[in-house]
Image (cartoon, rainbow, N blue to C red):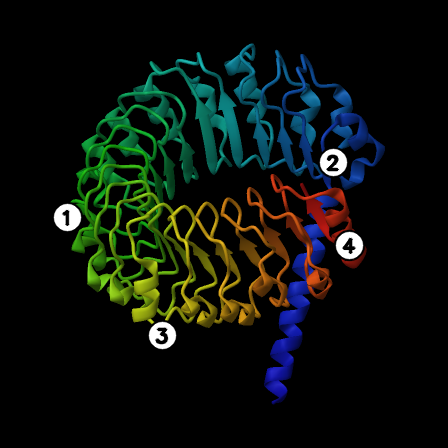
């Protein structure tokens, strides 16, 4: 018993410490140099983006505790030498300052002792200078470049920074990556998203330490075979490409925890996915999937599943048997008989706390929903609902309910008895009357009533009975 008390006390101390740190971080965030100079010792984060600055005053040198400096999207030509004397500066962003002299800037940056994160570049940049090699402490770099950038040279010089672990080479509209990317053998994160890649070079197979790989918004037609050596991969994001099939390559990632295959052209969910025993998040939304395999329950560590915007006609019985499932999104699959599914699967979903059934042409709901005990958020927007089953008033743990875009003519009575509800959305309905019983909703913090034919006197009832509630209309 004493051990349990000690553990509880330790947990509370850690929790309170984290909250205090969060508050301190907010206090140390500044959006102008003038305000920062009013209390220079407190400043840790200074964000001067989009301020059309031509130069940075030398007074920035007074910010001796500055850790993060964002100077992106300005018109800088030079940086003051005082920046190199900021002892705690570890991250700097210089994106979209096209007048910067890159050689000079990199020579300056090498004088910042603890600089480990850098974002730099602009849309017409075609190469980076050899001076980047001098950034000995650099761990993470983001490069914005022209589509014709010399990737052979870029990856060659970056490979000489031995501590470099994260490379973000995204949003550059490049169509080809040079083999020299294979020289970056210490990478743990590689982001090649939002380009025009149709294939990846074979030399990518040398990057065996990558744990996070972002390939989304390219033109890939298959999962590249060159990434199958990334055995330690835990995140693979390949959404918004041209995949029509889930190739056998997917089985190469035994430790994969997060997989995003959304916005492709998948017509089915291959059983090859079920080899991913450690998968926690699976997003296969916005495809053309008509059926889910019944053995989806083999993904017995799955916590988040997004099936929205497909052409599913049914849901497999095993879905509710995934004991770890916390979030389920099934919006925009109007052919599914949800009443039948929830009636047949009257147990399970024991861990589910987020359920999205929006945009499914529902005109009635199953009472079974009220038995999902841990449900915190329920999305039912853009359906054809006119009432809520009385049994749903028993949903004591529900915090957020979205009923926007339905056909309610009356305020749903069952909702009033959801004693812990904090957020209620009733936009785009036909409600003209607010019952006095709304005063029972003591936990309510926000209610949205936009585009309802509510006279002001009815809205005033909410202000009278629940004066602390935020009303959106």
Residue 309 quadrant: top left
Q: Earlier in the sequence, mark 3 or mark 2?
A: 2
Give the Cα separation between the discs numbered 2 and 1.
Answer: 53 Å
Residue ID at (43%, 69%): 367
- Location of the C terminus by quadrant is top right
Nearest to N terminus: mark 4 or mark 2: 2
What residue is pinned by disc 1?
A: 248
- Identify the residue at image location x=62%, y=41%: 450
Q: Which residue is mark 2?
A: 64
Which of pointers 1 and 4 lies earlier in the amino acid sequence? Answer: 1
Please say if the residues under marks 4 and 3 sit with CB atoms less than 8 Å apart: no
Q: Secondary structure at mark 4?
A: loop
Say which residue label 4 marks.
Answer: 468
The image shows residue 448, relative to residue 440, as above or below, that is above
Circle 2 SS class: loop
Q: Are marks 4 and 2 in contact (CB under 8 Å)?
A: no
Which label was assigned to residue 37?
Answer: none
Looking at the rendered image, the disc whose residue lies closer to the viewer, 1 or 4, is 4
Q: Residues within 10 Å of mark 4 (few under 14, many from 20)?
A: some
Q: CA distance from mark 4 to mark 3?
A: 38 Å
Q: 381 and 15: which one is in front?
A: 381
Give the foreground label among 4 and 2. Answer: 4
**Alpha carbon distance from label 1 to label 4:** 56 Å
- Which comes before the other along the chain, label 3 or label 1? 1
Residue ID for mark 3? 347
- Location of the N terminus (image quadrant): bottom right
Marks 3, 2: nearer the viewer: 3
Q: Is residue 362 left or right of residue 353?
A: left
Q: Farthest left residue? A: 248
**Can you give x and y, in whole percent of width and height, for residue 235 in the image?**
35, 48
């Amino acid at each position: 018993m004493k051990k349990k008390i000690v553990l509880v006390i330790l947990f509370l101390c850690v929790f309170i410490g984290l909250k205090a740190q969060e508050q301190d971080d907010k206090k140390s965030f500044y959006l102008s140099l003038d305000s920062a100079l009013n209390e220079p010792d407190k400043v840790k984060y200074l964000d001067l983006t989009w301020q059309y600055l031509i130069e940075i005053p030398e007074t920035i040198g007074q910010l001796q505790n500055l850790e993060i400096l964002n100077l992106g999207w300005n018109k800088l030509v030079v940086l003051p030498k005082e920046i190199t004397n900021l002892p705690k500066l570890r991250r700097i962003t210089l994106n979209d300052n096209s007048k910067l002299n890159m050689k000079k800037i990199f020579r300056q940056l090498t004088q910042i002792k603890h600089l480990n994160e850098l974002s730099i570049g602009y849309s017409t940049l075609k190469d980076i200078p050899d001076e980047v090699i001098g950034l000995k402490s650099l761990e993470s770099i983001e490069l914005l470049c022209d589509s014709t950038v010399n990737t052979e040279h870029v990856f060659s010089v970056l490979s000489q920074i031995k501590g470099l672990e994260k490379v973000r080479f995204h949003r550059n509209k490049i169509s080809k990556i040079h083999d020299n990317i294979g020289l970056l053998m210490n990478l743990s994160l590689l982001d090649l998203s939002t380009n025009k890649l149709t294939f990846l070079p074979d030399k990518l197979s040398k990057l065996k330490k990558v744990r996070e790989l972002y390939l989304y918004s390219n033109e890939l037609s298959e999962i590249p075979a060159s990434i199958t050596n990334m055995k330690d991969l835990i995140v693979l994001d390949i959404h918004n490409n041209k995949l029509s099939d889930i190739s056998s390559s997917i089985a190469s990632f035994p430790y994969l925890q997060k997989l995003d295959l959304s916005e492709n052209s998948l017509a089915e969910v291959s059983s090859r996915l079920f080899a991913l025993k450690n998968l926690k998040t699976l997003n296969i939304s916005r495809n053309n999937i008509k059926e889910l395999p019944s053995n989806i329950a083999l993904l017995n560590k799955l916590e988040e599943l997004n099936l929205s915007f497909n052409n599913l006609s049914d849901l497999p019985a095993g879905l509710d048997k995934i004991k770890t499932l916390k979030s389920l999104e099934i919006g925009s699959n109007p052919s599914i008989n949800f009443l039948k599914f929830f009636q047949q699967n009257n147990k399970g979903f024991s861990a589910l706390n987020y359920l999205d059934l929006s945009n499914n042409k529902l005109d009635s709901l199953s009472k079974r929903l009220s038995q999902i005990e841990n449900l915190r958020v329920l999305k039912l927007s853009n359906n054809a609902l006119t009432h809520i089953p009385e049994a749903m008033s028993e949903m004591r743990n529900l915090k957020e309910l979205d009923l926007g875009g339905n056909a309610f003519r009356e305020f749903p009575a069952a909702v009033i008895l959801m004693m812990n509800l904090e957020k209620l959305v009733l936009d785009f309905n036909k409600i003209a009357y607010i019952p006095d019983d709304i005063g029972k909703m003591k936990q309510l913090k926000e209610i949205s009533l936009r585009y309802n034919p509510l006279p002001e006197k009815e809205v005033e009832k909410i202000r009278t009975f629940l004066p602390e509630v935020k009303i959106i209309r």
